[in-house]
Image: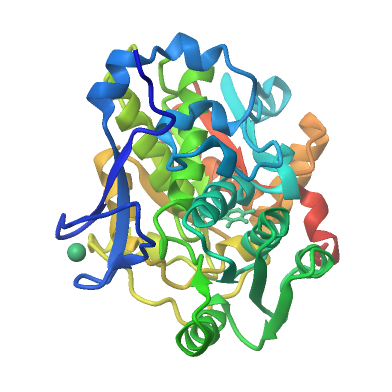
């Protein structure tokens, strides 16, 4: 049987459903000004490939290549991303009264954060489509990951980041030879500068959800979680939400696996978006029962990855939370720092402030009664605390 490397067959607008050709360079739907979503021939894939085959391949994100967008295996730009561990946390759990508490630890990815997954997919696909210059506005880790994969692909990279971006993020971009521009303001101000450069010089913009494939890379977290939970789902997944790529991606992954008939359950995990009190557009919109977010003025938090005043995928983030019966909760920087210390003392894990926010959020949901202490809860640590030394 001739099996394809990728079963990608089209992109579709998340709002008007108009299809777009994935063999051409695509950005977003110009009619709706909303993201494009990758769709795969799941019926064909399911009849030709088994999940056992995928499970038995060498470790890494690309063992899921049928569900990823790259068509030619030679075009994959990898640094070994993916297949991060799910570990139970018995000491932290019993300290806080939880009996089934887990971490999915994304700090083990190349560049020390889960941004590696999305950028590995986006840069590989861009390389396959012949793109040679990539540009990004970033709160930090996305820029570092883009610069790393662009260097390995031999592409030119330009990174626009706020002046107060953690030192490690600035250095990791510079050492790869990326053109780093510091911008007074927030990621949204950096994005304005990027749009200008794209218009004048024609760089390819790899901003969150402004191209369709970072979502696909981050989706693999959901594929791995399903396998790690033996084709079942945990009760609750707590996700530190900035642009929302991983939150939307994990949900997309579980839906694709259910459509393939590879899951042992039709249940969905309740997906929780945690944000910082100083930048909580999703929490505000969720509580106000809105379909989209309002730009969050004056955003500030030490968790730089959560400093996103409005996501381009706000509609999909809110849909994901509602369709999974999840919720959205905000935490203060003090709560984040205290969670970071408890986590380190109890389990020896030095998590990023964004990762620590998930623990702080979980405690709030325990106190409000939304979470039961015997539920299976997965906290996503999205980066290593070592990238934020100048903030401590
Ligand atoms: C970017 C980032 C986030 C937010 O991820 P999104 O998928 O954009 O919501 C969380 N944590 C860290 C460490 C990040 O770099
Ligand atoms: Zn559209």
Color theme of the render = rainbow
In the rendered image, is residue 350 in sight?
Answer: yes
Task: State left or right for residue 165 relative to residue 218.
Answer: right
Task: State left or right for residue 134 relative to residue 14.
Answer: right
Q: Residue 93 in the image: state x and y as whole percent.
A: 64, 26
In the rendered image, is residue 164 in sight?
Answer: no
Q: Residue 299 in the image: state x and y as whole percent.
A: 54, 76
Q: Residue 218 in the image: state x and y as whole percent.
A: 50, 44
Identity of the residue drawn at 23% across and 23% down? 43
* Res. 183 image quadrant: bottom right
Where the C terminus falls, by quadrant? bottom right
Q: Quadrant of ligand 2?
A: bottom left
Vertically, is 272 above or below 43?
Answer: below
Vertically, is 191 above or below 219?
Answer: below
* Res. 71 image quadrant: top left
Identity of the residue drawn at 53% across and 41% down? 362
Residue toward you, 385 or 224? 224
* Res. 92 image quadrant: top right
Residue toward you, 265 or 279? 265
Residue toward you, 239 or 174? 174
Q: Residue 169 in the image: state x and y as whole percent.
A: 75, 65
- How many marks on residues? 0
Identity of the residue drawn at 30% across and 57% down? 36
């Amino acid at each position: 049987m001739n099996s394809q490397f990728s079963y990608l067959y089209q992109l579709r607008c998340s709002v008007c459903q108009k299809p777009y050709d994935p063999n051409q360079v695509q950005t977003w739907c110009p009619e709706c000004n909303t993201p494009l979503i990758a769709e795969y021939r799941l019926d064909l894939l399911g009849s030709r490939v088994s999940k056992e085959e995928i499970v038995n391949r060498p470790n890494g994100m690309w063992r899921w290549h049928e569900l990823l967008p790259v068509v030619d295996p030679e075009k994959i730009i990898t640094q070994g991303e993916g297949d991060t561990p799910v570990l139970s946390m018995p000491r932290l759990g019993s300290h806080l009264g939880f009996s089934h508490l887990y971490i999915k630890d994304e700090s083990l990815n190349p560049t020390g954060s889960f941004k590696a997954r999305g950028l590995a997919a986006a840069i590989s696909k861009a390389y396959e489509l012949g793109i040679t210059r990539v540009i990004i506005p970033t709160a930090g880790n996305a820029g570092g990951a883009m610069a790393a994969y662009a260097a390995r692909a031999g592409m030119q990279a330009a990174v626009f980041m706020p002046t107060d971006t953690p030192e490690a993020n600035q250095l990791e971009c510079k050492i790869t030879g990326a053109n780093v521009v510091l911008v007074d303001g927030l990621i949204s101000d950096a994005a304005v500068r990027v749009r200008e450069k794209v218009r004048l010089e024609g760089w390819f913009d790899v901003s969150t959800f402004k191209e369709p494939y970072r979502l696909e890379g981050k989706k693999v977290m959901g594929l791995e979680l399903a396998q790690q939970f033996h084709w079942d789902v945990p009760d609750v997944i707590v996700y530190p939400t900035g642009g929302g790529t991983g939150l939307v991606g994990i949900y997309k992954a579980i839906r694709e696996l259910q459509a393939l008939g590879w899951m042992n359950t039709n249940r969905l995990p309740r997906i929780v978006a945690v944000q910082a009190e100083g930048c909580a557009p999703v929490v505000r919109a969720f509580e106000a029962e809105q379909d989209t977010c309002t730009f969050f003025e004056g955003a500030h938090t030490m968790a730089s990855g959560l400093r996103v005043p409005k996501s381009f995928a706000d509609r999909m983030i809110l849909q994901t939370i509602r369709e999974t019966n999840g919720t959205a909760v905000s935490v203060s920087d003090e709560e984040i720092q205290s969670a970071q210390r408890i986590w380190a003392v109890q389990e020896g894990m030095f998590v990023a402030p964004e990762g620590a926010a998930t623990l702080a959020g979980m405690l709030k949901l325990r106190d409000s009664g939304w979470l039961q202490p015997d539920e299976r809860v997965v906290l996503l640590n999205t980066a290593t605390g070592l990238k934020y030394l100048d903030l401590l």
